[in-house]
Amino acid sequence: MIGFSFLNPFLLWGAGLASVPLIIHILNRRRFRILDWAAMEFLLRAFKENRRRVRFEQLLLLLLRMAIPALLAFLLARPKASSDDFLGLARKVVHHCIVLDDSGSMTASSGAGTAFDEGRRRVLQLVTGLSRTRSGDLLTVLLASRAKPLLHARPVTLDLGAEMNEILREPRATPDRFRPAEVLERVRKLDEIVGERAQRLSLYFVSDFRKVDFEGRNGGLDEGIVKGLRALRGGETRFFLLPVLRGADRNLAVTRIQLLGARVLKNVEARFEVTVANLGRRATEGCELGFRLDGGTRLVRRIPAVPPGGEVGVVFRVGFETEGDHFVEASLPADRLPIDDRRALAFPVAPHARVLLVDGDPGEREELSETFYLSSALDPTEDGTSSAAVTRMDDNEFGDRPLEGFDLVVLANVASVSDEQLADLEAYVRGGGGLFFFTGDQVDPETWNRLFWKEGRGLLPAALAEIGGDLDHPVPPVLVDSEHPLVSEIGDLMEGLLRLVRIGRWNRIAADPKGAPRLGDEARVVLRLRDESGPPLLIEGRFGKGRVGLMTTTADASWTNWPADFSYPVLCSRLVDTLMRKEDLSPRNLGPRGVRRFDLAAAEYSSEVRLLPAVERDDGFGERLVHAVPRADEPDLLDLSVSPEDGRSWPGAGPLKLELARTDGAKELRFFTVSPWPEEGRVEILRRGEILSRLPRDLAENSRWIEGTGEAQAGIFAEEGEIWRVLAFALLLFLLSESLLAWRFGHH
């Protein structure tokens, strides 16, 4: 129900001036004396015949002349329409809460700036409109990525617009994503603090309204949004949606950089795959994809046109001559949405992989041991310059050293292990360690199946059976899975190298009742014998977070001539690269709200650390000082925690570096990256009414979709704004009507 109140109620006394025309009319009637005059009889007779018409004309003029000063008094009192008060006697205070989307998609550019620039203008227009029409209400303004609001429950005054203009100069769009359900929960908590100081809540969302932010399962509205709206004052909140910068339909994005292989080793070529996706609705043209190491020289690859919803992967091969922290960065030509045109990946470069070789048959001479050729293939120099640092031990020594110090454990023709050793192995692989089995004449299939297969629940990727083959009639290996990481990108080379390899004996794989080999759920056969349907030779599977491989022949030359072939060291190095413990890069590659944490030795490092951009950037991020603090449980260690400011997102995406000062005066760099959500660049937006049509009816009735940029276009305050224009038009109409009627009646 719409009521009225007045900004200048004391001027309503002017409505009493409406009595002036009535008083003048009465006084004018008393001014005349009645005189009898014979000649007037004829006039009186005519007047009596027209008396009703004359009285009606006089009454109409009198009412118009009384309405004119009353309208003028109402106009000066500045009435306004509102459902929150009636005649100013029972005014309801409204808590206005404005949410400005500052997610990564708001960096989208147009001729007039970015979507976030337009959003700021919309907020300023809202605040200005409130300051003119809703004096005494309360205002809260918050950015979607910040826990702390820019303003909270600030009384609305005429100067609030100027203050808001200053407040909004500092914020920028961030790499964070827009989470409406989380924002609604924050609004609820802020409104609870306001409590009974306000009797109603009006909520305003200023956003580009990307579908990925608002849609839930099956294309409907996210259930969290509906629940969040119902939680606001029992679902009686007024909800206004103000869209900005609509209509983009193209966007090519770098959505991922991943390391192919377990980790990066010094002086060993590493492979990185960059995924470029078309998140728009139109096909893109071919373009150049750049790739830089540590912000240095830029490598370029040409990528083809990408259809809508499609993606392409590009592999870059690079090497690193120094160990320690490094980063790579991929970039596309700038487009309208720059937030996803770049993506970086930080990682450590290790001096070598740590490999433990457990020899089940040491032999009478060194060259007859199971691990002799394997050790020579992995670490031919034995001086620490190879990509693998090999530790060899007999199977009776196995268990004396903790496995966590190794990236890959190889069991070569090991007959058995103790229950304790088996438990250590399972824990090691389950936690991410790599394990590889070579069989041999020491292996009893029944024992291995009991220890390592466990009916598919153990470490082995396949169940073993009896020994097969004939040393006098060896057969060649055949590559059957060229897409497997062990041989990907070198499949043709490997097929050529394997032509001279011969396998004389091997362990068969047990078969199920239907004759199919008994393989683990995620096991893949990479090599077979004789032909593509022959016995499995090389099988790879998973156990927990780790990877496990099985070679059904020996690591030495007793069953095969493979150790003397050129392909042997190639395959061994790929085994290490694929199966060894995978480096967890997530602590170094953060999301928009991520925190980088690690420990420093208090005796070696200063507690003061500089945080800097690793490359030049234009998001305003500058140098910051971060302080490491001693750990309460271990005073010899410093706990370094690097995060965005409290309750905020990182201000921009890209690589960052920490400059650590050592006590010996040297400087040390640690890199990490901040990346936006990979789906942030999807261009599909919610059109007018799409949100409202998906809201429950009771919520939709209190919601409005507001197009336009100005207050007059938006019409947000039309229901509860001043109506002086209507009264001014009515006053002019009454004045004109009075003049026309007075002239018309005067001629009768």
Image: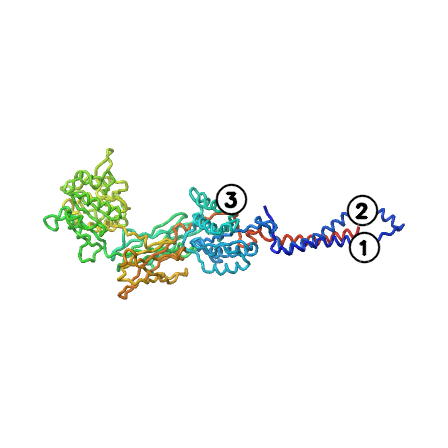
Rendered position, 710 above or below 543: below
Of badges 2 and 3, nearer the viewer stands 2
Q: Earlier in the sequence, mark 2 or mark 1?
A: 1
Report x, y in % for residue 554: 17, 45
Q: Which residue is mark 1?
A: 31
Q: Earlier in the sequence, mark 3 or mark 1?
A: 1
Report x, y in % for residue 440: 16, 43
Of badges 2 and 1, nearer the viewer stands 1
The tag on residue 700 is 3
Q: CA distance from mark 2 to mark 3?
A: 59 Å
Is residue 623 toward the left or the right of residue 567 in the image? right
Q: Dot 3 lies on which element?
A: helix
Q: How many labels, in total?
A: 3
Residue situated in front as seen by the camera: 653 or 156: 156
Q: Which residue is mark 2?
A: 51
Kindly identify the amino acid type of the residue bearing the numbered disc 1.
Arg
Q: Residue at x 39, y 62 (%)?
A: 622
Kindly identify the amino acid type of the residue bearing the numbered disc 2.
Arg
Disc 2 + disc 1, Cβ < 8 Å: no
Report x, y in % for residue 488: 27, 48
Residue at the top extreme, as displayed: 513
Of badges 3 and 1, nearer the viewer stands 1
